[in-house]
Image (spheres, helix red, strand yellow):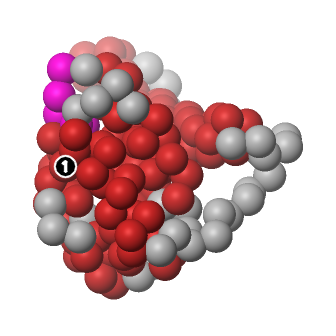
Amino acid sequence: AAARRSCGPGGGSERQVRAGTALRKARRQEQLVSKRLLREDAAAEEGGQDGAEIVPDPLSEDEVLELLRGVQRGSEDRKRSLSRLRWALQNKETQQKFVRLDGSIRTLIGLFTSSLADMQMEAGRCLHELSHSSDPAVAEACLPVTSYLLTY
């Protein structure tokens, strides 16, 4: 009788289940909105209109390598190189070329885990672009990134 009084009519556990379901649904919706806003920001920065998806042309291997070197150098152009890389990684062919380069994923992980907030954000955006890939080689190359994405 005491247990029934504390739960109230209909039982407290049902109410808790409904609250948990509503909370999960709200979190899922928040994640979807965040992803959409991230895409819209990227499109707006690169001249897209109203968040329209504009997939860039694939870069040559030399262009991808030059961007990676620009990111690795540590110069003041690093953020610009990272932004250009993020934009370029929306193209499947460019993703494939990037992950084949030695140290490419390690470089992004290093920047993602650094103490430089603007570099963390850009590296995170690059990793986010790669995480959308349906290509098995890109997915395999991104496996070491999973724990960092979950942690950060």
Residue range (magenta): 111-115
- The answer to whether 99 is drawn above or below residue 150 in the figure is below
Q: Quarter of the image containing the N terminus? A: top left
Residue depicted at x 43% and y 20%: 8
Q: Is residue 102 left or right of residue 142?
A: left
Residue depicted at x 28% and y 70%: 99
Residue closer to the observer: 33 or 59:
59
Residue closer to the observer: 17 or 40:
40
- The answer to whether 106 is drawn above or below residue 76 in the figure is below
Residue 131 is at least partly visible in this image: no
Q: Is residue 16 left or right of residue 44?
A: left
Picture quadrant where residue 25 is located:
top right
- The answer to whether 41 is drawn above or below residue 107 in the figure is above
Q: Could you tell me residue 144's position as x and y percent?
A: 14, 60
Give, as a three-letter code, the residue at label 1: Thr
Residue receiving disc 1: 107
- The answer to whether 97 is drawn above or below residue 66 in the figure is below
